[in-house]
Image (cartoon, grey):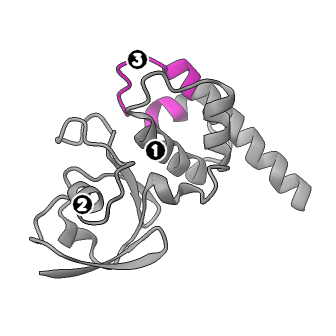
Amino acid sequence: MKIDLRVNGKAQTVDVDPSTPLLWVLRDHLGMTGTKFGCGIAHCGACTVHVNGSATRSCVVPVEAVAGADITTIEGLSPDSQHPLQRAWLELNVPQCGYCQAGMLMAAAALLERFPSPTDEQIDAHITNICRCGTYQRVRAAIHRAAAMKKAAAARTA
């Protein structure tokens, strides 16, 4: 079945079984391998993407459920890897093994859209992704750093 999607701002049509998880459509049919498979049950968050701006665990979402939706993957977060979160992640050495990081970044980006200056409690409540390396304190620090970067950039343009 042909399904129309909008991925990273680009119209895409895929011919797949409508029950195929979005994760596999992104990886196997569209070649966007930044989104990772972790657990397959929406628990770990390695597969997090944005669907119409909301952080979504793509391993359990059938592609038919997101037909026509705006989907953003880690490849679409920033064309030049200069999103404040990506910069903060590198400045604070957040990644260790790095496997969970694309999902963490996508969850954090959705959080910052909802809460431009999140508290520790908001971060803890919304970033439920699992990091086997345990970089949670650095993740939290990087989210605060990115929020400050975004605020400073907004002040410069105001």
Q: Amino acid at mark 2?
A: Leu
The quarter of the picture where the N terminus appears is bottom left
Q: Nearer the viewer, mark 3 or mark 1?
A: 3
* Magenta stretch bounds: 123-139
| Category of crowding for the residue at label 3, using alpha-carbon neighbours closer than 10 angstroms: few (below 14), some (14–19), many (at least 20) | few
Quadrant position of residue 131: top left
Residue 22 point in image, percent of width and height: 24, 60
| Distance from the alpha carbon under mark 2 to that under mark 1 | 17 Å
Is 124 one of the magenta-colored residues? Answer: yes
- Residue 114: where, in percent of width, then height? 56, 52
| Residue 133 disc label | 3
Q: Mark 2 — residue?
A: 22
Looking at the image, which residue is at 36% across and 74% down? 69
Quick check: is 79 in the magenta stretch?
Answer: no
Q: Are marks 3 and 2 in contact (CB under 8 Å)?
A: no
In-front residue for pair 101/31 = 31
Residue beneath disc 1: 107
Alpha carbon distance from label 3 to label 2? 26 Å
The answer to the question of whether label 3 and label 1 lie on touching residues, with beta carbons closer than 8 A, is no
Instruction: Name the element at disc 2.
Output: helix
The residue at the point 55 percent across, 19 percent down is 137
The foreground one among 66 and 23 is: 23
Crowding near pointer 2: few (<14 within 10 Å), some, many (20+)? Answer: many
The three-letter code of the residue at mark 1 reads Ala
The percent position of residue 35, horizontal first and vertical second, equals 35, 48
Q: Amino acid at mark 3?
A: Cys
